[in-house]
Image: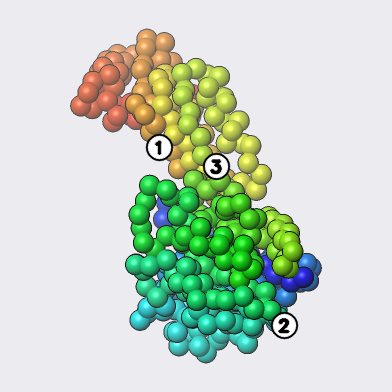
Amino acid sequence: MVKFLHTADWQLGRAPLFLSEEARSRFSAARVDVIGTIAALAATERCDFVVVCGDVFESNHIDRQVLVRALYKIRDARPLPFYLLPGNHDPLDASSIFRSPTFKEHGPSNVTVLESSAPVQAAPGIELIAAPWPNKRPLVDLVGEACHSLEATDALRVVCGHGRVDAMAPESHDPAHISLGRLEEKIESGVIHYVALGDRHSTTDVGDTGRVWYSGAPEPTDFVEDEPGNVMVVEFDRDGVRVERHRVGAWHFEYRDWELTTDLDVDALRDWLETPDNKERCIVRASLRGQVSVAQRARVDQMVDHFTDLLGGLEVRDGEGGLAVVPDDADLDDFGVSGYARAALSDLAELAQSDEHAVAAQDALALLYRLTRMSS
């Protein structure tokens, strides 16, 4: 039996632009720090090696600081071997980060870049068959090409690829999609024994053999991922395979649509924002729609300000139809003003229900309401 750790899509150097500068720095650092977690897990599980199946880096032009810190994290795991596959974010083109002076100078002895499909011996009797991306727009199935001429041998083979499997995009005719049928034929004939894939950030078992997997990204990258934050410990031989996922990610994303019409709805929104553990490492997106009073809108604005300071990131956007503020007499009475000020509020209330200036008037009413509450 051979045992190794399968991971992919580290995307070192990535940080969402909508995060604050402070949060972006922590988010980027976490993607480097998880290398140490991966190395510790591989040591605990007695893995023979680690394969990183594409998109090791966010691009070929990341900050030097990120690169050298990542390389030193891998160096600290010596003698555990790491095999790095170039993907669509970091292809082996003219500007490849894997061929940069910094990588050449500081790349540790336990790192091997999989630059071709020539078999690489990762352990006694274990071959890696790699399909590195030569550029961002390949016009062929790179994994299929790497496996095409292989014949059965005594070696156990791990195919390391990156990209979308055709069975997961049946209506697409992209020539670069990986043919699942061709891979399963090679598996059934004993030519290859496990296919380690990257590109899909959610941990996914592909096909019917149990030998084709996306590991997912070890740190999440977006709201749409089903099950990110994992790596795979794989143990296999010719007769069987055992795949075990391990959670290593520190950050997480939360998203929800909200319809707000009552105080109870606003309370529920606040309770949801309170729910995440490790709030400083949680990125939240709330899509709001419905119809609220001035007082309710002011509460929403106040909680957004509060949780923006608590959470790793908070993005509030309008849902379908948006969140409308519909002031009534009770709202205006709550301001506690009279005379000209009351007349001005009435004008704002009318504008809040107009077509041209509604949003600005609604924002103004909510802000004024908060200011009057602070001074009362």
| Circle 1: residue type | Arg
Label placed on residue 317: 1
| Circle 3: residue type | Glu
Q: How many marks?
A: 3
Place residue 108 in its image quadrant: bottom right
Tag 1 secondary structure: strand
| Residue at image mark 3 | 254
| Residue at image mark 2 | 124
Give the mark toward the camera: 2 or 1. Answer: 2
Q: Around disc 2, counting alpha carbons within 10 Å, would you say few (fewer than 14), some (14 to 19), or many (20 or more)?
A: few
Tag 2 secondary structure: loop
Place residue 310 in its image quadrant: top right
Give the mark toward the camera: 2 or 3. Answer: 2
Residue 360 rendering spot, x and y as whole percentages: 28, 31
Q: CA distance from mark 2 to mark 3?
A: 44 Å
Q: Is residue 336 visible?
A: no
